[in-house]
Structures are given as C-alpha cells and as structure tokens.
Amino acid sequence: MHRLIYKSRSTEIIDKESVRDILYTSQEMNRKSVVTGALLATNSHFLQILEGEFEAVNETFFRIVHDPRHGKVELISFGPIDKRLFDKWTMKAFGLFNLNEEMESILKEKYGEEEEGVYFPLEELLVLSLVADVSMMNKSPMTS
Ligand SMILES: Cc1cc2nc3c(=O)[nH]c(=O)nc-3n(C[C@H](O)[C@H](O)[C@H](O)COP(=O)(O)O)c2cc1C
C-alpha cells in the first residue's frame, strides 16, 4: 500500500462546480482501481492525497499530472504506508473557498496564506495536519 501527496496550481479559478466536475470523473475511476484519498482546494490551488496499491496510485497520478485543469504539479511525498487514512472515501473533497471567516483566519494563521487563500504546505507532516484540521472543522465534505 502506498500514499502519494502533491500540490498543484489551477489554470482557472476553482469553485464548487469545478471541484464537483473533478469528483464526478474521479470517483468511478478510483472505485475501480481501489484508490482512496482526499482533495483540498482553495480558489487557486489543489492539494491531493492518493492511497492504494503502488501501480494504481502511479497510474492515477500519471493521468492527473497531464490534466490541463492544473499545472505546476509539485510532488510532496510518495511512499509505503501501513494503512489507508481515507479508507471510506474514493475521494473526500474539501473546498476551502467557502469557509467561514473564523475558520479561514485560524488556518491562515497556522499554515500561512497564498493568493488570498490558505497556504498549502509542501511538507508531508504539515499536509496531514492541515487535512486533519480541515476535516474536524468541516463535518460535511463535498460530494459529486
Ligand atoms: C485536481 C485534480 C484531481 C484529480 N483527481 C483524480 C483522481 O483522484 N482520480 C482520477 O481518476 N482522476 C482524477 N482527476 C482527473 C484526471 O486528471 C483525469 O481527467 C481523469 O482521470 C480521466 O482520465 P483520462 O482523461 O485520461 O481518461 C483529477 C483532476 C484534477 C485536476
């Protein structure tokens, strides 16, 4: 079992609809290849965690990297894991563009800011901490 984390910059402004479109195509493919994970989005950036068998994660990432909806893809980590963190989710998505002001300022203070949104860290430990914070704050993740 492997986990891959990357950050990318969207080529267009991200909104609920664009995240829904991505989920719509991802969920069926991820179900088939037994890939699970989480997707965070601000108005400008994506941060994604993919979990599954090495080949499945590799193939999924290869497709994602070539998607024209984003660029500047930065690989944060890719390595073996003992178990999935997101085993119940083909892809659990959180839009950080519709946070309330208090949550947004807490996250900006802790992680920083980029292009008016919450900064997506390039360190694996900080990514996992951010995802944990966001899932605690947001009890109802987006679905397609
Ligand atoms: C930010 C982002 C995240 C994505 N996540 C996934 C994913 O988890 N699984 C997946 O199959 N496709 C994902 N996609 C879509 C793929 O890039 C691609 O469009 C899709 O897999 C269909 O591949 P194909 O056009 O080569 O058939 C994502 C795209 C973007 C922009």
Image: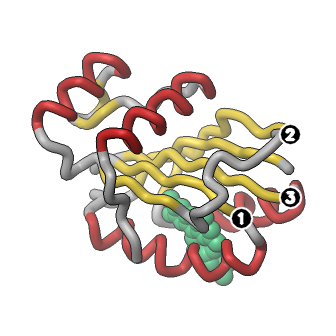
Q: Secondary structure at mark 2?
A: strand
* Cβ of mark 1 under 8 A from ligand 1: yes
In the rendered view, does 135 fall on the left or right side of 4?
Answer: left
Residue at the disc numbered 3: 53
Rendered-image quarter of ligand 1: bottom right
Residue at the disc numbered 1: 35
Contact, mark 1 vs mark 2 (Cβ under 8 Å): no
Instruction: Name the image quarter holding the C terminus.
Output: bottom left
Q: Secondary structure at mark 3?
A: loop
Answer yes or no: is residue 67 visible.
no
Q: Amino acid at mark 1?
A: Val
Among numbered discs 1 and 2, the one appearing first in the sequence: 1
Q: Amino acid at mark 2?
A: Pro
Among numbered discs 2 and 3, the one appearing first in the sequence: 3
Q: Position of residue 55 (x, y in %)?
A: 88, 61
Among numbered discs 1 and 3, the one appearing first in the sequence: 1
| x 75%, y 70%: residue | 34
Q: Position of residue 56 (x, y in %)?
A: 82, 64
Q: Amino acid at mark 3?
A: Glu
Residue at the disc numbered 2: 80
